[in-house]
């Protein structure tokens, strides 16, 4: 693993700026890797051995991901929204796991460790460079029962929401009164008033500008999409249909009589109160 200053500089470039949270995150990641016995988890031989749970969506989280190489899309980075400046590092090979928490005492002692530095942010940054790990962090040895469907790798399980028809991966479905539901249907979503829309270039593809005439579609696709409720009914009823019926070709044929949904240009953004 590179030294602290190299990691801090590269992490700050990736994050977009240098800040105290970057220093805390880089040091937290370096300590976590040492504790679980991984010298450099970004190396190919170690890249599948580390799982990290971050408990905050702050600057330190980006630093931890940068140093360790864990990623949401590779399923080696888990975000648990506790609002706590902490992260847990799990060696998937040995199952060794340590939770590291940033201490409030470290913030109180900033002036003690960098008395000559002026400016709050600059003083914190320098102090977090100088503090020993024992002042900057608390460490807990923990057990993390990682379920098979939470491990990195391909999806092994899918379910279909009985209400909206959405496919739910990796055991994230919710059972309510015997019905399989996605979390938005079961618990409510972070968004509201969802309305599917059309947009001017909805048939664009990355290869379409360079396609030869022989590869162009024989006829343009319909400039509309169907309502969610109608599509949902089609998906749910599809399992009851005969195998020789081609859902995709019927959907793209433009022969169905569904009402077109509201074009994007006609939607009005509500004014803030």
Image (cartoon, grey):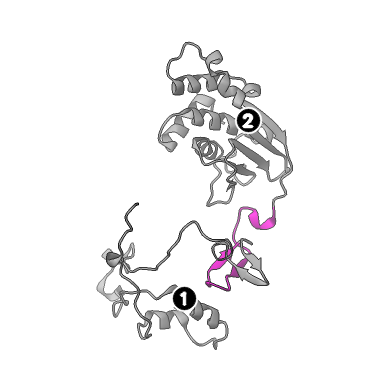
The number of numbered discs placed on residues in the rendered structure image is 2
Mark 2 touches mark 1? (CB < 8 Å):
no
User: Helix or strand or loop: what does disc 2 sit on?
Assistant: helix
Return the residue found at the far front. Answer: 273
Q: Give residue 118's quadrant in the image.
A: top left
Residue at 52%, 52% (x, y): give it. Answer: 73
Give x and y (percent) for residue 132.
62, 20
Q: Is residue 200 visible?
A: no
Give x and y (percent) for residue 164.
52, 71
Considering depth in this image, is 157 or 19 the residue closer to the camera? 19
Quarter of the rendering occupied by the N terminus: top right
Residue 111, above or below 93: above
Please check the rendered image and state whether residue 150 is part of the magenta-colored stretch, yes or no.
yes
Considering depth in this image, is 120 or 44 the residue closer to the camera? 120
Residue at 49%, 23% (x, y): give it. Answer: 125
**Of tags 2 and 1, which is closer to the observer?**
1
User: Helix or strand or loop: what does disc 1 sit on?
Assistant: helix
Residue 57, above or below 236: above
Q: Give residue 270's quadrant in the image.
A: bottom left
Q: Identify residue for label 1.
A: 229
- Return the disc, 2 or 1, that comes first in the chain's sequence: 2
Q: Identify residue for label 2.
A: 31
Residue at 55%, 37% (x, y): give it. Answer: 64
Considering depth in this image, is 206 or 148 the residue closer to the camera? 148
Residue 59, above or below 76: above
Q: Which residues are magenta?
A: 147-169
Report the side of 260 relative to 232 (left or right).
left
Residue 52, above or below 208: above
Give x and y (percent) for residue 229.
46, 76
């Amino acid at each position: 693993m590179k030294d602290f200053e190299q990691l801090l500089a590269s992490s700050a470039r990736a994050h977009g700026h240098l800040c105290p949270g970057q220093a805390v995150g880089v040091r937290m990641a370096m300590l976590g890797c040492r504790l679980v016995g991984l010298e450099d988890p970004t190396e190919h031989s170690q890249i599948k051995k580390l799982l990290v749970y971050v408990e905050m969506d702050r600057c330190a989280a980006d630093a931890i991901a940068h140093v360790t190489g864990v990623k949401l899309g590779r399923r080696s980075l888990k975000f648990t929204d506790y609002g706590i400046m902490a992260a847990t590092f799990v060696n998937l090979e040995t199952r060794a796991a340590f939770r590291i928490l940033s201490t409030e005492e470290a913030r109180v002692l900033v002036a003690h460790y960098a008395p000559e530095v002026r400016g709050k942010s600059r003083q914190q940054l320098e102090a977090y460079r100088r503090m020993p790990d024992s002042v900057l962090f608390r460490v807990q040895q923990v057990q993390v029962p990682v379920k098979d469907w939470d491990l990195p790798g391909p999806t092994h399980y899918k379910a279909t929401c009985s209400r909206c028809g959405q496919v739910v991966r990796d055991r994230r479905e919710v059972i309510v009164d015997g019905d399989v539901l996605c979390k938005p249907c079961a618990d409510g979503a972070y968004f509201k008033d969802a309305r599917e829309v059309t947009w001017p270039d909805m048939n664009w593809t990355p290869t379409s500008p360079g396609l030869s005439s022989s590869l162009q579609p024989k006829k343009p696709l319909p400039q509309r999409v169907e309502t969610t409720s109608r599509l949902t009914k089609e998906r749910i009823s599809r399992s009851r249909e005969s195998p020789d019926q081609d859902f995709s070709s019927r959907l793209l044929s433009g022969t169905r009589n569904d009402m077109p949904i509201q074009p994007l240009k006609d939607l009005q953004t509500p004014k803030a109160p």
